[in-house]
Image (spheres, rainbow, N blue to C red):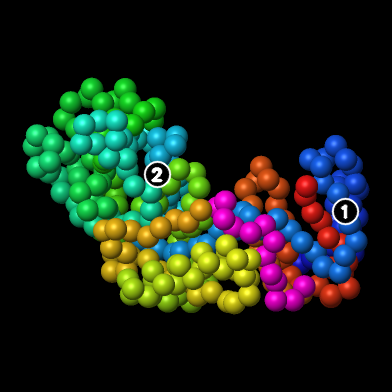
Amino acid sequence: MKVTWGFFLFLLLTFQNIFADKGYAGNRIITDSSITMNFSYIRDTLFTSQLFYIEINLTTQTGYLHSRDGNVKIFGISSGTDKLEEGINTKEGLFVIKSKMPKWYSRQFDSTLMLNWMGFNYGIGFHALKSSGYYKYLGKKKSSHGCVRVSRTMAKFLYDTIKIGTPVLVHKGNSIITITFTDSTREFVHYNLAELKKEIALRYKQMYTGRYFINSRENIIIDNNNIGHQGLPIGNPKNILKRQIIKSPSSFVQSVIPPNKGIMIIHKSFPREVFNTQITSK
């Protein structure tokens, strides 16, 4: 989108009028030589060449099957809980599907038959059960010994749809990683497992110390070869500094902010003298 000088000034004056209103979430304007935005909603992005990826929200007990064409299929799940004897909470992290079996008997839990098994974290994976008693918990309550239970219909659909290496992002609504799909407009790199761990740790450190925008970042592909059974950590958004250092005021900056928080994105470079207002929040 082409942003003209006049349009930018119009936006700046509009923001000034809005933020000058004390009833607007306590925002205010002060004069300074640079512009400051709340970057606590930035998220790092990793890429997959697969057709799908799965997202699991443990807090809402909801699963999302994201498709390359933009469609999202939502389904109820029931994850693991340590309230059960020998049970464990399903671990947060970024994983990939490591194994698939139409039928698998759990050696740990009385040889329970698990249908359309799809493992991603050692002995933890997606599956259905032969009986329907667990259906009442799907989308509502944790009830498994560690795995992610889904309905028989959904388990069969997932089993037939996804492939080994499909990303699985498990969180409680607080991941600082997002997954998206590769395309022909960008260049991508592939790190091995050890290199990827180091790179992710570095990116988290930069976000936590306010230096995320200092250096350029490569577009990294994740797959079955560089994510092991133990997965990758997904970070803590509470540790991201709201104020991030920008190399220069005219640098290209894009911050990912949830729609309900408002969008603050700079699409192109502007002369230094434009950046003479600092927007802050109490």
SS at mark 1 in the image? strand
Q: Residue at x 80, y 64 (%)?
A: 35
Main SS category, magenta section: loop
Query: Residue 130 at x, y = what percent?
Result: 16, 30
SS at mark 2 in the image? strand
Please provide the residue range marked out in magenta. Answer: 237-249
Residue type at numbered disc 1: Ile
Query: Residue 199 at x, y = what percent?
Result: 44, 72
Left or right: 132, with 47 as reference point:
left
> Which residue is label 2 attached to?
56
Residue type at numbered disc 2: Ile
Q: Residue at x 32, y 64 (%)?
A: 227
> Which residue is label 1 attached to?
29
Image-quadrant location for residue 149? top left
Which is nearer the N-term, disc 2 or disc 1?
1
In this orientation, does residue 151 appear?
Answer: no
Image-quadrant location for residue 172? top left
In the foreground, 229 or 218:
229
Magenta-span inclusion, residue 99: no
Left or right: 223, with 188 as reference point:
left
Query: Residue 41 at x, y = what percent?
Result: 62, 54
